[in-house]
Amino acid sequence: MNNLTDARNYSEITDEIRSLSSLTEENSQIPTELYREMNVKRGLRDLDGNGVLAGLTSISEVKAKQVINGETVPCDGELYYRGVNVKDITSACLNEGRHGFEEVVYLLLFGALPDEKELSDFKKLLGSYRSLPPSFVRDVIMKAPSGDMMNALSRSVLTLYSYDENPDDTSLPNVLRQCLQLVSMFPLLTVYGYQAFDHYHNGNSLFIHSPLPEASTSENILHLLRPDSSYTALEAAVLDIALILHAEHGGGNNSTFTTRVVSSSGTDTYSAIAAALGSLKGPKHGGANIKVVRMFEDIKKNVKDWKDDDEIAEYLRKLLKKEAFDRSGLIYGVGHAVYSVSDPRATVFRGFVERLAAEKGKEDEFELYAGVERIAPGVIGEHRKIYKGVSTNVDFYSGFAYDMLNLPAELYTPIFAVARVAGWSAHRLEELLNCGKIIRPAYKEIIPTREYIPLSER
């Protein structure tokens, strides 16, 4: 090796880096009281969890409060896609015995519910896009497979830019074409990325199944992932419901806001979606369901009687006191920035998860989840001042559902992305159509100006 190639271990944190890090910390810490004094809403939210109004959207709405006798009070959460209650969509899918994610994609992108022919034609269009460029799997996905599927997915999305003959055109038809292709490709990029990782890092057999153009998104995920491509009707239905519930969540969530911020700069679709993926990867956003599953693994080890409410409550107190699990002081899956009384996605999903638990013979585990769901709000209320109510969110049950579907933990957040790319696409299109200016928030400088001191005099 020469001096250009054997320089150092790039993961090593040296004493020099530690010293420089301390300098950064010393000069970058901002006193908490200044946020209150200057009326700065940290996280773009007030103490009641209300978001700062940053834009308008016709795509979806989250309702968590209602006005009674002139007073705003929390209520059971509701989620609407283009004005349609998501509960009505999932109920129709259940009653009619069909999958609904593709219908939701149509609704989010075009603002109207399709009739039977429109939906059939749209499914065929998505099916025709459900493929990757020639040699993409070999040349991109199979080379240097990442241990983190979200990073692998981001890399694949950015690389698709090079395969697009018109990547920078931000006209409506071109961006719509790109978005539809990404919606169709995401299951392939996600599962193939995992298969490559599982083969090269875990030494397991490599399975690369061709997609089924006529099958639904949930069916394709299970088909592509499993060696024998088999799945039950209930498994596909539960995964389809999960995709519907994760497809969109108002304009204020972190990854959707990221999509709109980046889109407002006029950049290409692939860069905007890759930025959203980077946001979703964070454990405070899409990565929370993995934390829930791992937290419950720890609960099962430390709570001897899963039906003992007192024992469960004591463990939850240890979580809040940073004495258990990852010592973060959090009960993962409980609480939400907007919802207080209930998260409608968790309410809808809970019933499907219960049915799946019965099919898989995991009723005891479901009862443990239900017990934590029932007990946690009271325990949190004992230890912390709550400005609004607290309830379980969709992450609470989704990780358990994915575990019962035998989805590897590495795919939990990417599956979220497979669903949410529909919402991101809708918001990108809306931003490009209505954006007049680049999104640029204001930050107030708090350090006084000072003179530059020549280097020789310092």
Image: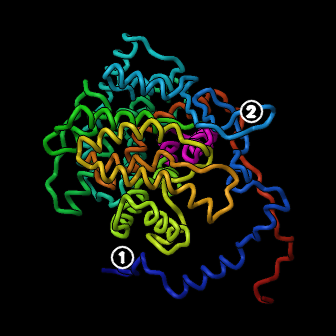
Q: Which contiguous range is marked in magenta? A: 251-276
In terms of depth relative to the viewer, which is nearer, 394 or 287? Answer: 394
> Which-is-in-front pick, marks 1 and 2?
2
Measuring from the top left, give residue 422's x and y in whole percent: 46, 33
Instruction: Tell whether position 182 is magenta.
Output: no
In the displayed structure image, the side of residue 101 where residue 320 appears, left or right: right
In terms of depth relative to the viewer, which is nearer, 372 or 60? Answer: 372
Instruction: Tell whether position 252 is magenta.
Output: yes
The quadrant holding residue 444 is bottom right
- Please name the residue shown 45% across and 50% down the image: 396
Label 2 Cα neighbours within 10 Å, binned few <14 / some 14-19 / many ≥20: few
Label placed on residue 67: 2
Measured in 3D between alpha carbons, the distance from the residue under mark 1 to the one under mark 2, in whole angstroms, is 65 Å
Query: Sequence order check: which comes first, mark 1 or mark 2?
Result: 1
Residue where numbered disc 1 is placed: 5
| SS of the residue under disc 1 | loop
- How many numbered marks does the figure carry? 2
- Please name the residue shown 69% across and 45% down the image: 51
Measuring from the top left, give residue 365's x and y in whole percent: 32, 53
Relative to residue 194, is residue 244 depicted above or below?
above
In the displayed structure image, the side of residue 36 where residue 63 appears, left or right: left
Inspect the image, locate mark 2, and give the three-letter code of the amino acid beneath it: Val
Label 1 Cα neighbours within 10 Å, binned few <14 / some 14-19 / many ≥20: few
Measuring from the top left, give residue 6's x and y in whole percent: 35, 80
Tell me if I can see residue 82 in this picture: yes
